[in-house]
Image (cartoon, rainbow, N blue to C red):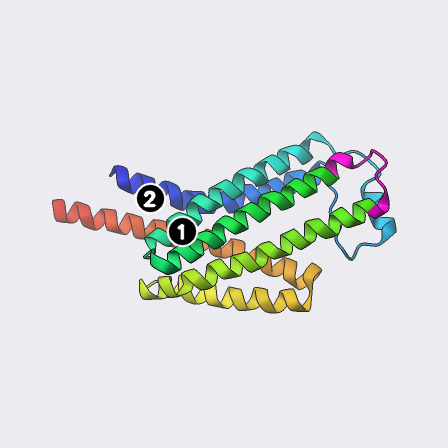
Amino acid sequence: MKHTSHERLFAAFGIGSVVVELTGVAIGAIGGRPFVTITSSPADVRSAFDTSVGVAAWIGAYLELLSFGMFLAFAIWACARLGGGLLGAIAGAAATGYTTLCIGAVGIGAALAYRAGHGMDVQLATTLITLNEAVYICTWFLSVFYLLAIAPMALAAGRRIIGWSAVGISLVVLVTTAVSLDNLGQMSNLLWLAWVAGTSVALARGVRAEATQAEVVLA
């Protein structure tokens, strides 16, 4: 039973990582966190950094950082649940890289937010925005690497929905990123978050089913 509770905890980390990340983004927006991209005009950049951010912006960033730690725990656990091995090691490395770059992206965004309202030069702000978005986009590719590594593991384990959805989302992310970074690419990243949450639920149900079968056998 103790082993089962640990399994459920890791599954909960997956769902929690998505909820906490999206909550952090929403709270950050309430706190006045600047949301500008590489396609924003100089006037929009200047306007976004005219005033200081509120406390909520820092709470949001704090929650985002926590969410990435939760994701990493889930991602490595999911690899183990689906078989591990060489593909599991590759997926785990991709998840670690994804987490590292996400934390870096939040750090750059926090540096931008900290300088807001302190007379930051538009050129400097634009440079940091470009760097922040470049790091963020790199995380999309790492999420694809994770999905493509874990897909055959899921299919081999009989988890067809998890496996084929991983392949489908990977293709969507790769295509939309090439077509449109700021629009379709950003939106397709939500599919990745949906996959994490959905896979967490699916694997958690598997844990419950295994526990029930074990109880029947012992009875």
Q: Sort mark 1 into few (<14), some (14-19) or many (20+) by Cα contacts within 10 Å.
A: some
User: Percent position (x, y) of residue 209?
Assistant: 27, 51
Instruction: Tell me the residue at 63%/67% (across/down).
Output: 176
Instruction: Tell me the residue at 49%/48% (across/down).
Output: 96
Q: Residue furthest right?
A: 43
Whether residue 191 is visible to the viewer of this picture, yes or no, is: no
Task: Write down the quadrant of residue 73 in the picture.
Answer: top left
Q: Which mark is residue 7?
A: 2
> Residue 197 vs residue 132: left or right?
left
- The count of marks equals 2
At label 2, which amino acid type do we have?
Glu
Task: Write down the quadrant of residue 149 in the picture.
Answer: bottom left
Q: Nearer the viewer, residue 184 or 137?
A: 137
At label 1, which amino acid type do we have?
Val
Q: Give the labeled residue for mark 1.
A: 201
Quadrant including the C terminus = top left
Q: Which residues are magenta?
A: 113-123
User: Percent position (x, y) of residue 88?
Assistant: 38, 56
Q: Which mark is residue 175?
A: none
User: Percent position (x, y) of residue 84?
Assistant: 34, 55
Q: CA distance from mark 2 to mark 1?
A: 12 Å
Instruction: Tell me the residue at 33%/40% (across/down).
Output: 6
Instruction: Tell me the residue at 36%/62% (across/down).
Output: 153
24 over 89 or under it: above or below: above
Please identify, in this view, whether the residue under mark 2 or under mark 1 is nearer the observer. 2
